[in-house]
Image (tube, rainbow, N blue to C red):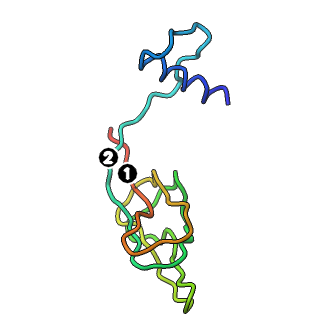
Amino acid sequence: MRRLLDALYRLLHHLGAIEASEHIKQPTVQPRDWIWTGDVESPAAGLWYPDAVTGDEVTEGQTIGCIIDPVDGAEHKVAAVSTGTIIYNMNGLTVRPGTHLAAIATPHD
């Protein structure tokens, strides 16, 4: 919890909203730059059940979840569109075709 508060205080100071405090620890890990490599969209309407979560490493073609049609029980597997790290994962249950399910990125060196 302290780490999150320190990050919030650093951000507010950077934006000029508050004065700097000597009690705020400086970050120990440098932020990384990311390159967006793919967006995963729903191919069908139904209920989204992810198998991969934010922070998971995935490879292109790997199944990251499935969409179940609640009417007929049909299952639609959803695959990663690229190799990288999932940096966003949709947590809502109901989806329709084209719903943004996940975003994948790789670190920029």
Secondary element under disc 1, as helix, strand or loop, is: strand
Residue furthest top as drawn:
22
For this orientation, the residue located farthest to the front is 17
Q: CA distance from mark 1 to mark 2?
A: 5 Å
Snapshot quadrant of residue 102: bottom left
Q: Is residue 37 above or below residue 43?
A: above
* Residue corresponding to mark 2: 35
Q: Quick check: 76 left or right of 73? A: left
Identify which residue is drawn at 50% across, 28% down.
Answer: 29
Res 78 → quadrant: bottom left
In the rendered structure, find residue 80 and report the number of the disc placed on it: none
Q: Residue at x 66, y 26 (%)?
A: 2
Position of the C terminus, as image quadrant, is: top left
Crowding at mark 2 (Cα within 10 Å: few <14, some 14-19, many 20+): few
The spot of residue 14 in percent (x, y) is 43, 18
The residue identified by callout 1 is 105
| Quarter of the figure that contains the N terminus | top right
- Badge 2 element: strand
Given residues 57 and 92, the one toward you in this image is 92
Q: Amino acid at mark 2?
A: Ile
**As drawn, which residue projects farthest toward the right?**
1
Q: Are marks 1 and 2 in contact (CB under 8 Å)?
A: yes
User: Horizontal and vertical percent for residue 5?
Assistant: 61, 26
Residue lying at 44% horizontally and 70% vertically, measured from the top left: 62
- Label 1 vs 2, first from the N-terminus: 2
**x then y, percent, for residue 57:** 48, 56
Frontmost residue, 97 versus 38 = 97
Q: In the image, what residue type sits under mark 1?
A: Ala
